Image: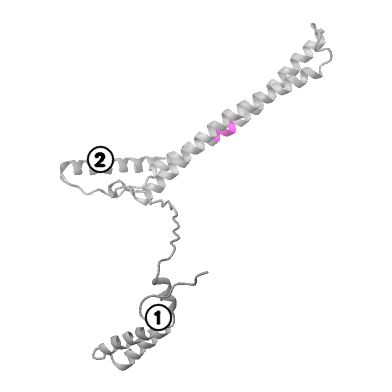
Amino acid sequence: MPGPSAPTGCSITEAVTILGNKLRDYRGQLNTTHLLAQCDYFHNTFIRHYKLYQYVLGQDQDVNLTVTHLEVCVPPQPLPLAAGKDQAVWKHRQQVVGLSAAEVQTRAYVLQLKEALQLQQQHLLQEMLLELPGWQRQALKREELENLINEAIHIHTECLKELLQYEIQITFDILDLKLQKKTLNLSAPTPSPLPITGQSGQDEALKLYKANKGRKAKAKKK
């Protein structure tokens, strides 16, 4: 088995000689302490591992290339400064949106509750019919029919009573949400005044002032 090829380039003695010549050329620019520090640095780093560097860099090496595809998510493009809002206005808007979402969720809950109570009513009626003796006969006795009707009316009444109680409570919740939205709208923060340029800018500022003044007057009356 053939051994490794001989390293090419200068020998270590020649490398030390070249280093000495280079340091000698800088004697006029560096003092003796700096030159000795440079010499120690090269001896302790480069010269110490000179043969290793010569073996690795003096001949062709097998290249092992690893490629990794990295997906970088850049931050979203911010909106222009002209589209920005005051912090107080933004917080107020978020509160209004939250109350509106709560109202929609409450109304959806009412529909789900109605469906659940209807299913419960149907289930109770089926159980009552199965427990009735002789329900599979084509004709029922008068007493059995009266009991069946009375029980069905009772079940229907109880379900309606429960649904009515839920609807009353949910209606109060929705009214409370609407009242909170109304209060927020009356106490909406005033946005920072825009720079007034020309007659159109003055008219816009005047409209904004009158609108804010009207909201404050309504709030005082309430």
Residue located beneath label 2 in the image: 207
Spot the residue most to the bottom: 32
Q: Which mark is residue 46?
A: 1
Q: Secondary structure at mark 2?
A: helix
Which of the pair 72/84 is nearer the observer? 72
In this view, 56 is above or below 70: below
Q: Residue at x 31, y 43 (%)?
A: 212
Q: Residue type at mark 1? A: Phe
Q: Residue at x 57, y 30 (%)?
A: 110
Give coordinates of residue 31: x percent, y percent: 29, 92
Q: Name the foreground residue: 133 vs 54.
A: 54
**Amino acid type, label 2:** Lys
- For the residues labelled 2 and 1, the Cα–Cα distance comes to 79 Å
**Which corner quadrant of the image does residue 55 belong to?**
bottom left
Q: Residues within 10 Å of mark 1 (few under 14, many from 20)?
A: few
Foreground: 78 or 152? 78
In-front residue for pair 64/161:
64
Residue at the spot 54% in from the left edge and 36% down from the top edge = 173
User: Magenta span covers which residues?
Assistant: 167-172
